[in-house]
Image: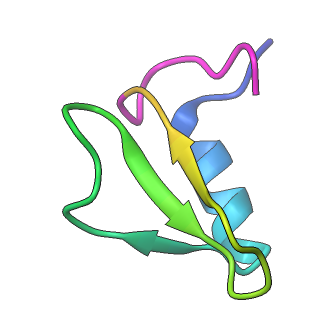
Amino acid sequence: MPRKIREFKAEIQREGFVYLPKRGKGSHEHWRHPLLRKALTIPGKDGMMCHAI
């Protein structure tokens, strides 16, 4: 069964990604890792299934 968005967010936070508040439009959120140049955009609310990620 696919995991939920909240589980994916917890996983990337453990990997060192930091949430960038006020940068997403609607249900999109931006996350950034200190060693990477680009931001990771996560669409959807916490309870949605994470199929393609």
Q: Residue 4 is drawn in which quadrant?
A: top right
- Measured from the top left, where is residue 12 in percent x and y? 71, 62
Task: Reply above or below: 52 against 44.
Answer: above
Q: Does the segment drawn in magenta span residue 48?
A: yes
The residue located at (76%, 28%) in the rendering is: 53
Colour convention: rainbow
> Which is more toward the observer, 22 or 4?
22
Q: Residue furthest front?
A: 37
Q: Is residue 19 left or right of residue 21?
A: right
Q: Position of residue 17 (x, y in %)?
A: 64, 73
Q: Residue at x 40, y 26 (%)?
A: 44
Query: Image check: 49 left or right of 14?
Result: left
Count all numbered tags in the image, as a single digit: 0
Which residue is found at the position 52% from the left and 44% from the top?
Answer: 41
- Residue 44 in the image: above or below residue 38: above
17 or 11, nearer to the observer? 17
- In terms of secondary structure, what is the magenta stretch mainly? loop
| Lateral position of residue 15 relative to residue 13, left or right | right
Q: Nearer the viewer, residue 46 or 40?
A: 40
Q: Would you say 28 lies left or right of 31 here?
A: left
Residues rendered magenta in the picture: 45-53
Up the image or down, 26 lies above or below 9; here it is above
Asked if residue 37 is among those painted magenta in the image, a careful observer would answer no
In the figure, residue 5 lies in which quadrant?
Answer: top right
Quadrant into which the N terminus falls: top right
Residue 19 x/y as whole percent: 44, 70
